[in-house]
Image (cartoon, rainbow, N blue to C red):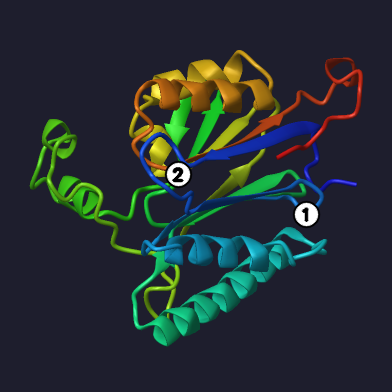
Amino acid sequence: MNNVALPFESFGVSHRGCVRELNEDSYLVEPETGLWVVADGMGGHDAGEVASASIVDHLATIGIASSAPDLRARFEDRLSRANAEIRRIAESRGVTIGSTVAALLAMDGRFACLWAGDSRVYLIRNASISQISKDHTEVQELLDTGMISAAEALTWPRRNVITHAVGVSDEIVIDFQQGEIMPGDIFVLSTDGLTAHVTDAEIEAAAVSATPQAACENLLQTVLARGGTDNVTIVLVKIGNGRNEAYPNPPRAEG
């Protein structure tokens, strides 16, 4: 059983990149639950890895929800538990640690995207890619207020400073967007290690031209070929068109 009304395939990959010693990203592919997640930990000395892993570990316990509102309530409950755990770990170590999170929830023909930080959720629909999430960063706030231009944002000294994350305060600030799932939709979740090296147009081209597994692997190889300056994690969910002939075999979810 899956909770998406249309057939789908999904896949995820994660890599430490070409520069970092550790991979502090984590991800979750849970098609039976209707949940896909990426998380980018921060803190260094394995603390970031602990933070992102805490998020994924707690979200993995959601189980099968009874409705879309129930799924979101379970998500927020588990994320709150992860936040508390990360806070306890940070206090015990005397450091500040945290993690971004970007998630796709799908059930009963509808989706919800929730995020904190600069990990992203994209939707490709009708051959057009759009960023559903909005970065929680200082540079995005400056863009929103018109204090800098889009061109200036690309090289802004503090462009990687995020304004919201899980584990950095007792209260979590999460944004969300929701809508109806349409046949042929493709969702791409990623940490900023992908978007540092690959354009939105390149993400779209890779996603529409291959299976989720091949698309994820192709995007990862592109990032590594261009220097892989950060950890990179990609999760891709492709919605079918509802016709049996489009999926001669049952859709697989891997990761």
Q: Nearer the viewer, residue 28 or 184?
A: 28
Residue tagged 1:
33
Considering depth in this image, is 65 or 46 the residue closer to the camera? Answer: 46
Tell me, for residue 20, which label it has, or none.
none
Residue ID at (37%, 50%): 118
Residue nearest the viewer, comparing 174 with 92: 92
Residue type beneath disc 2: Thr
Left or right of residue 65: residue 162: left
Disc 2 element? loop
Q: Residue at x 42, y 47 (%)?
A: 21
Q: Is residue 135 left or right of residue 133?
A: left
Q: Nearer the viewer, residue 141 or 108?
A: 141
* Residue 8 position in % (x across, y down): 76, 32
Quote the CA–CA distance across marks 1 and 2: 22 Å
Q: Is residue 212 above or below residue 175?
A: above
| Discs 1, 2 touching: Cβ within 8 Å | no
Q: Quadrant of residue 146?
A: top left
Q: Position of residue 133 (x, y in %)?
A: 43, 46
| Badge 2 density bin: few <14, some 14–19, many ≥20, Cα 10 Å | many
Instruction: Say which amino acid is labelled 1.
Output: Thr
Q: Is residue 253 left or right of residue 11?
A: right
Q: Position of residue 229 (x, y in %)?
A: 34, 36
Q: Which residue is mark 2?
A: 191
- The quadrant where residue 246 appears: top right
Q: x and y percent of residue 253 in the render?
A: 78, 37
Q: Residue at x 55, y 20 (%)?
A: 218
